Structures are given as structure tokens and as C-alpha cells.
Image (tube, helix red, strand yellow):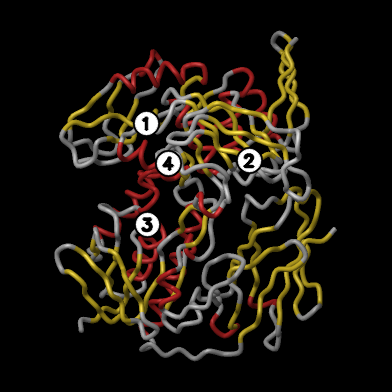
Amino acid sequence: MEIHELTCIRCPIGCQLTVTVDGESVKVEGNNCPRGAEYGAKEVTNPTRTVTSSVRVRGGELPLVSVKTATDVPKDRIFAVMEEIHALTVDAPVHTGDVLIHSVAGTDSDVVATKTVM
Amino acid sequence: MDRHDLIIIGGGPAGLAAAISARENGIEDILILERDVRLGGILNQCIHNGFGLHTFKEELTGPEYAERYAKRVIEAGIPYKLNTICADISPDREVTYVNAEEGCVTVKAGAVILAMGCRERPRGALGLPGFRQAGVYTAGTAQRLMNIEGYMVGREVVILGSGDIGLIMARRMTLEGAKVKVVAELMPYSGGLKRNIVQCLDDFGIPLRLSHTVTRVHGKERVEGVTISEVGPDRRPIPGTEEFYSCDTLLLSCGLLPENELSKSAGVRLSRVTGGAEVNESLETSVPGVFSCGNVLHVHDLVDYVSEEASRAGKNAAAFIKAGGVRERGRAIALKGEGGVRYTVPQFIDRANMEDKLTVRFRVGDVYKGKSLAVYYDGKEVRRVKKRVMAPGEMEELVIMKSSLPENTEEIIIRVED
């Protein structure tokens, strides 16, 4: 049995959640609404995050273009995603929405530009 | 002297939303003055996500949010000048700007919208002991260096202040390979949004030490470490609680201040609490035809509310211009925060000019759990809203209905009560 203490971030109230994982069963306590229960369960079974960073640009008006993962990636893949982002340099121009890395770090998410750099 | 119907000072989120709204409300002759190399303001360096949940019902990064508004300004053909700094605004709305192509130019404005944003509380305002070493940055300066200019500002980092930019930079520097050792916050609560504490600190195991401050910055040429001490209820360091952290970088995230030097030159009356203009229901300042919106009016947590507020400023400026620059002003009802409500925006309401619903925004001065917000018209309670949690870091709002507001009201007060 695992017990996790976390803060719900679905709204500004910030309920202190206690999530108990016992085999298949996940029990959330301390929440004041169903969104808290959903958040608590997801955070301990499958936590995901959007990763945002920047990528070097050659020959552009700016030296960097900001990027993000187009969808959330598993939380434990964040640093693997960052490694691929660090290794990349792209040529200008780059447009918002351009895919710069397909299926980054073995996830099913792409890294896309969030800025236009001519 | 050239003349424009509307001049907007600042091409960040407030200025862009104000421009779009003014155009939608029939103003053709608009000019936006922007000092940076592109439109979008501070959003261009806020590369993290979490913007636009209210406005676009999706989660965008700062540059994406900025680009959507900039695109609408460009598509609407609204003129703007980049690399152009506004040097002065006179009380009769003569605007002086400077850029490399035109030099120093003064133009007359039918109306002015102040949308200059805010700046960070600098080291000098904090009374930090120590030499003037390299390695001390405000969090926003570090953010610009890292996200726009591509410099890594340090390897071992301590952050003083738990404002949102500091929290965001804790994560950003960690992702870029730095070791963020601790975030120290003078107050017993954080000044940042809860989601930022969870996703920027908790995710990476970065400790947040509440009721702690930096009492010494070590090193002469370069930061070599800081001493952090616990503070008592009087916010003074408690002797014997000193702890040394070695680091090469100290980031400061200790509050934002509306940037109102130009407002002062225009003669705009400022609030001592917000540091921004005192405004009426139309977001018009004490100087007729000069409007204010966004972080130059009061510091917001969410850009979505900046855009919404700026749209109202644009619409009201358009009405002022279309009325030929003279608008009947009725008697002003004073709107005040008391008993835990630090301020309100607006500070005055002219009932004749207000819309059916007026959104009033404000901040509380402490963390309150299970309290209520009570609204009084001339001492008579008219509304009471129960709030589970209120905190200084999260802006509150209430709506005043015109239909509920008697014409002869003198004063509206909002209070925190049991």
C-alpha cells in the first residue's frame, strides 16, 4: 500500500489530498469535489505534464524559438524530452505550430514551435 | 502637430486587446507605441503554458497567446511602431515618442490608453546586505536572458520570493540543468499561484521555506552563497536560525510594481495601494480621456483578465472619442475595500456611465479560510458571498449590478467578514 500527500491544483482552493494506492484500488481523501478525486487519482497513477523550453535557431532574427510538447507527456519522461530539445538546432524561419521533433523521447507527443522566428 | 484619435502606450497583451476593441467600436485612427522589437510584451519571454484558459478555452504558452492578439491587430491594419519609446505624455494628451527613424516626435491624441505593464521590485528596494556581486538577477531578467537571448544565468541557484515568475524560473532553470536549492519566502504564505508551487517546485523536489529571508549574500565579485534566516511574526530575522547555502546565482521574485512614470507626467492620480492609476467604471483616470488597463493599472495573476479589462478600456476610449472628447460626468460613487480587502479597481463609479454589470477586482491582504465577502451600499449590507479560501496571491472579483445600485448611493464598501 502506498500513500501520497499532494495539493490539488484544479482550482485555487488547493485541497490537501491523501491518495492511497492498494493494488488496483485508488482512494482519494481530502478533496471537496469530484475534480479533486480525478486529479488525485491521475497524479498517482499516470501523472503527465506539458514540457516547455526553447530551441536554438540558426540565422534567425532571434537566437531561440520557444517550443512545447503538443500534448502532455508522462512526468517521468520530462528530462528525456529535455535531452532531445537540448540537442536540437533548427534553421530560420520557424513558424508557430511547426513540428520540430516527432514523437519526442519515445512518447507519442511532438515538440512544436510556439513562436514565429523569421 | 500630427494627431491621432487614439494612442496606446504599450504593445503587450493590454495594449493589443485595447486596440482591437477600440477598432471594433469604430475608431479608425489608432497608433500603438511599443518599445521592444516585436508586439506581445512580456508574454514573449513567458514560454511556459497556462495562458488563455478563460479567453480561448485552451492552454497556450505566452508567445502563442501574444501571437493570436498581434495577428488580429495586424489583420485589422492597426498601425504600430516598434523600437519606439514613449518619453512623455502631457495633461492635454500630447504624446512624445522617440525612435531611430523619426527622432523625437510629439503628436496630439484624442484619447490615450496607458498599457505600459509593470516592472519587478529591484534589489535596491529590498535592502539586501552584501556587496554588489555579479549573479543577482530579478527573476524576469533571468527569464529574458534565458528564453529570449539564450544565456544560462547560473548553475546553483537560490530564489528569494515566491512570486509566480520566481516559481516558473525555478522549473525553467532545473530543466536547463541548474540545481535550484531553495525558494525562501518572507511571508508565511506564498505570493504565487498554487498550480505553480505544485508544478514548478513540488515536481522537482525544490523546498519552499516560508517565513524565511536572505540575510546575507556572500562573495565580492560573484555570488558564492547566501545565508537564509527564519523570520518571526514581525518579519525580522530570528538570531540563531541562519543557514548557509552555496550558490552562484540569486534570483529575486519579490513583487511587481506598475510602471507609471508616464502616467505621472500626464498628471494622473495614482493609488498608494496598487501603484496604478485611480480609475472610474470606464477605466478612465483622473485626467479626462486618459484610460488605464492591464498591469500598469494593477498587477494581475492571469493575462486573460488583462485582455478582458483592456477590451473594456478600448471600448470606453472609443465612446469618449466618438462623443467628441467631452463626456458628461455625473456624481462619483466611491468604491472602497476595507477589513482585509486591500483595494478595489475601479475606485469610483459614475452610475450613469456604468454598464448593467460592472466587474470589480481586488486583492485581500492575508490568507482567509471560510470567510465571506460582504458588500455594503451606504452602510447597508446588500450582498454576502461565502469564500472557501482567499489569498493575496489570487485576485478576487465581484459583480455590481446597476439595477441593484440606488441612484443616490454615496459609497460602496467591500469587506472580509466571518
- Relative vertical location of residue A52 with respect to residue B33 in this rendering, above or below: above
Q: Which of pointers 3 and 4 indicates the residue nearer the eye?
A: 3
Do the residues marked 1 and 3 share a common chain? yes
Which residue is the site of mark 1? Answer: B152
Q: Which chain carries label 2?
A: B
Marks 2 and 1, the one that precedes in the sequence: 1
Q: Dot 2 lies on which element?
A: strand
Q: How far apart in space, not on screen, are marks 2 and 1 (Cα)?
A: 26 Å
Label 4 is placed on what type of residue?
Leu
The C terminus of chain A appears in which quarter of the rendering?
Answer: top left
Can you identify the residue that label 3 sits on? B12
Is residue B1 found left or right of B306 in the rendered image? Answer: left
The mark nearer the N terminus, 1 or 3, is 3
Residue that mark 4 sits on: B60
Question: Is residue B293 found left or right of B237 in the rendered image?
Answer: left
Pointers 2 and 1 within a single chain: yes
- The residue singled out by tag 2 in the image is B215
Instruction: Give the amino acid type for the residue marked by disc 1 in the picture.
Output: Met
Residue B373 occupies which quadrant of the picture?
bottom right
Mark pair 3, 4: CA separation? 16 Å
